[in-house]
Image (cartoon, rainbow, N blue to C red):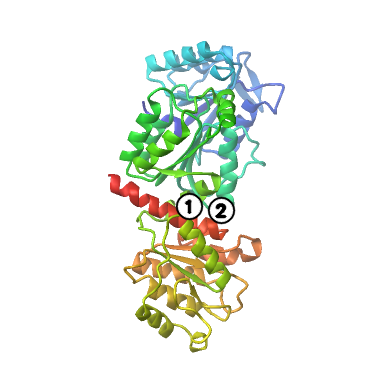
Amino acid sequence: MNFEALFRPKTMAVVGVSLTNDRHPANVIYNKNNLRYQAEVFAVNRRGGVFQGKTVYPSLGDIPRKVDLAVIVTRAELVPTIVRESIQAGASGAVIISGGFAESGRGDLQEELVSSAREADFPFIGPNCLGIYSPPYIDTLFIPPERIVRPDKGRVALVSQSGGLLVDQMVKFAAEGVGLSQAVSIGNKALVRECELLEYFARDPQTEVIAFYVEGFGRNEGREFVSLAARCPKPVIVLKSGKTPGGTRAISSHTASMAGDYDVFCAVLAQHGVVEAKNEFELISFCEALSCYSKPVEGRVAIITASGGHGALAADACLSHGLSVPALPEQDQQEIRQKVSPRLHEIASFRNPVDLTGSAVDDDFMGAAEVLSTKAGIDCVLLLLLPYVPGITSDLGARMSQIYRQEDKPLIAYVPHVERYRMFIEGFELNQIPVAHSIEGAVHMAEALRRQRSCSQRT
């Protein structure tokens, strides 16, 4: 199946636009796309009419132009007929927002959709979903434009069975500065499932990292997914729910999925080198780190800090995640000592963590990072930047990125995420250096690079 019409349509019809209720989901989707996205949009309603001065067509077949994508937002019992009409009108795919299918006991309606689509080689997303966010082409998420938070354009594709979780992750991606290439809510995933989207995004030149929120798989589907993920040339991250009996029951009523045995699934992911995020915080950190660095690490971390307490917490976190914080040989310590200001010689610690103290200035951090980035025994540098240290400036992030470009050794920063310190964060983010808002988050990023090592070894 060709998914280009799903993600980059030139024309789109929204089926179900109401002439009397402007808050109807179809109207929200129509208005948003008509005013803010590139695809040309047409409104469809069985009764026809005029909406906002434009013709409302009774069916896709009445639209004077070929429509690439049909977005269907009607009662469930009408959807099979609309899908068949869309196929007959020459549409190349559909997003079915409507609910009321397998998740509510109408598996027969869902099977009818699948049968028609398969016969015509007609891809559709859903039903029971929010659909596709693919800037600048379309956005079928029926969230009013003034309420949706859009991450910057980036290199992570996010696929989720839950529309609500997808939107929530978009908010958090935006807050953490993680960019999205595209996002898809697949709901009941009656036809297009994780496997097909994994293959599509593996070929998509705008995507470098593929992340999934998974509730469950059909028979043998999980095995196929893991096999595809293991062969994918890009990092694949999976967040799975249904880890407990309560979560499994919730999944069944949400998207009619079978959660399966979580422990078995987890073990299979690890066996095939697929990166599993245990929770949403890991998901965001993993996406940010892997979208910045493709080079895997063994997990030997050097920590540079201006606070001994921060360094100790980071070292504990590293070790608890299976990373190592190797002590630096005396020769390396002397090398760093020669690079920093003489006033630090008696008060700083040059072991690992390297604690430069609150008296350090930009050049001291640069000197330590330059030395550590050349050491073969270190494969990732963690910089704990405390913006309230008086001697540092907002240029430090940009200057640090120059070291990464010279030495190609991953650098991860921790900076408290408050608006007052935004100028410090931007210096890193503008230069593709990942920045965590917590020490634990920074360690998660290093952990993602270590797990990516397993992924790179599998291919």
Instruction: Choose between 208 and 325: the one closer to the eye.
Output: 325
Q: Position of residue 51 (x, y in %)?
A: 66, 24
Residue in the image at 39% along x and 50% along y: 451
Residue in the image at 39% along x and 83% along y: 334
Residue in the image at 47% along x and 28% along y: 260
* Residue 194 falls in image quadrant: top left
Q: Position of residue 362 (x, y in %)?
A: 51, 77
Residue under label 2? 176
> Is residue 155 among what the camera can see?
yes
Q: Position of residue 151 (x, y in %)?
A: 55, 47
Quadrant where the N terminus lies? top left
Q: Amino acid at mark 1?
A: Glu
Q: Which mark is residue 87?
A: none
Q: Amino acid at mark 2?
A: Glu
Instruction: Choose between 58 and 422: the one closer to the eye.
Output: 422
* Left or right: 198 in relation to 57: left
Quadrant where the C terminus lies? top left
Q: Secondary structure at mark 2?
A: helix
Q: Earlier in the sequence, mark 1 or mark 2?
A: 2
Above/below status of 20 relative to 416: above
Instruction: Choose between 209 and 358: the one closer to the eye.
Output: 358
Residue in the image at 47% along x and 60% along y: 318
Residue under label 1? 288
* Left or right: 290 in relation to 427: left
Q: Secondary structure at mark 1?
A: helix
Q: Tell me the distance, in whole angstroms, between the alpha carbons under discs 1 and 2.
A: 8 Å
